Amino acid sequence: MERRDFLKSATAATAAIATKASAAAATPAPTTRPQSPDMIYRQLGTTGETVSAIGMGGFHLGKQKDPAESIKLIHAGVDKGITFLDNCWDYNDGISEVRMGQALKSSGYRQKVFLMSKMDGRTADAYNKQLEESLGRLQTDVIDLVQFHEIIRMEDPDRIFAAGGAIEAAVAARQAGKIRYIGFTGHKDPAVHLRMLETAQRHNFHFDTVQMPINVMDAHFRSFTHEVMPVAIKQGIGVLAMKTFGDHFILDSKTVQPMEALHYGFTQPVSVLITGIDNQQVLDQALEAARTFKPMSQAEVQSLLARTKEAASQGKYELFKTSAHFDGTAQNPKWLGETTTA
């Protein structure tokens, strides 16, 4: 073996050992937050954390023309019992995090919520840079959960778990108290999620959460519900549901009503259903879905899935699976921290 090959192998081995040792670090102590009798609360995987079954999606909270509207929506949701807030380093060029930070700064709101954000960086350097920016925008010293964003390529797990990869930065950030839990997200193909979970296991790393599409059409096409969710639950990983409405496209199919779609999502064994909320009417709809929720029977679920089967069969209304419409890192590969194209 040539010296440079030996050094490369030694570096990779050292990084792997460090990751394994760090993965065994002490579990953070769960935090208690106020609860509302009209909200559903669930355990977040095996973290010991209790969170609201509704998560306020951060992307939509950066779309209001007046920042005060965004802040008002966040306060209204938290006041009604929502404790799980979603965000991402790249949402609306950082505006979503800035506004959420402004909302949480006032009247003790930060202590009332479980705060999540996501990083696009696949390298340790890119991850660290993005994390510091997110901490600043969110005006907090610690983010409760940080997830690797848009794991949508088969090579993404290799990039993250490579020597100098983002996993090293995430573990170090957890040890430093900047983040408390680590997860990942993706919306493209169950095979990519499964490869991420397999790669983590090979490195003796346990994810706290995994975010994926769970909706009334997913069962019929590249199904995360059938292929990934059972694996995650078996491993004690908290499942975060997203794409309940597929933006608006699933509702455009005219096969399901919003309340049905939300109740279907709540019926699944997920910890949180993250939904986009951009105005008071949509917030009220989500709150009403939680207030009126009763688990659907198997017959009711099958009836609903039968209704959506034909429309869902080719992924026409799940554009996040079949197009680049939702792939921010494909359109902006520099976010990954690499010079190669996505």
Image (spheres, rainbow, N blue to C red):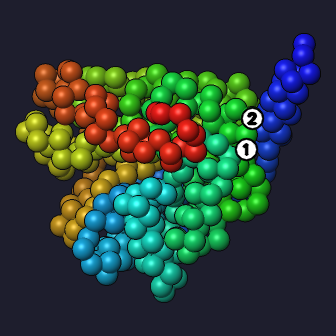
**Residue 163 numbered tag:** 2
For the residue marked with disc 1, what is the amino acid?
Glu
**Circle nearer the N terminus (2, 1):** 2
Left or right for 84, reference 178: left
Say whether marks 2 and 1 touch (CB < 8 Å): yes
> Which residue is drawn at the image coordinates 73% and 40% (left, top)?
164
Classed neighbour count for the residue bearing mark 1: other residues with Cα under 10 Å, few (<14), some (14–19), many (≥20) = many
Judging depth in this view, the residue of 93 and 216 nearest the camera is: 93
Q: Quadrant of the N terminus?
A: top right
> Which residue is drawn at the image coordinates 14% and 43% (left, top)?
251
Q: Which residue is mark 1?
A: 168
Classed neighbour count for the residue bearing mark 2: other residues with Cα under 10 Å, few (<14), some (14–19), many (≥20) = many
Marks 2/1: CA–CA distance:
8 Å
Measured as percent of width and height from the top left, residue 82 is found at 40, 65
For the residue marked with disc 2, what is the amino acid?
Ala
Measured as percent of width and height from the top left, residue 169 is found at 70, 49
> Which residue is drawn at the image coordinates 31% and 35% (left, top)?
324
Regarding mark 2 in the picture, which secondary structure is present there?
loop
Question: Is 244 situated above or below 219?
Answer: below
**Residue at the bottom extreme, as displayed:** 107
Judging depth in this view, the residue of 301 and 78 nearest the camera is: 78
Measured as percent of width and height from the top left, residue 116 is found at 51, 58
**Residue at the left extreme, as displayed:** 254
- Quarter of the figure with residue 71: bottom left
Residue 17 shows in this picture: no
Regarding mark 1 in the picture, which secondary structure is present there?
helix
- Tell which tag, 2 or 1, sits nearer the viewer: 2
Residue 129 shows in this picture: yes
Measured as percent of width and height from the top left, residue 279 is found at 22, 68
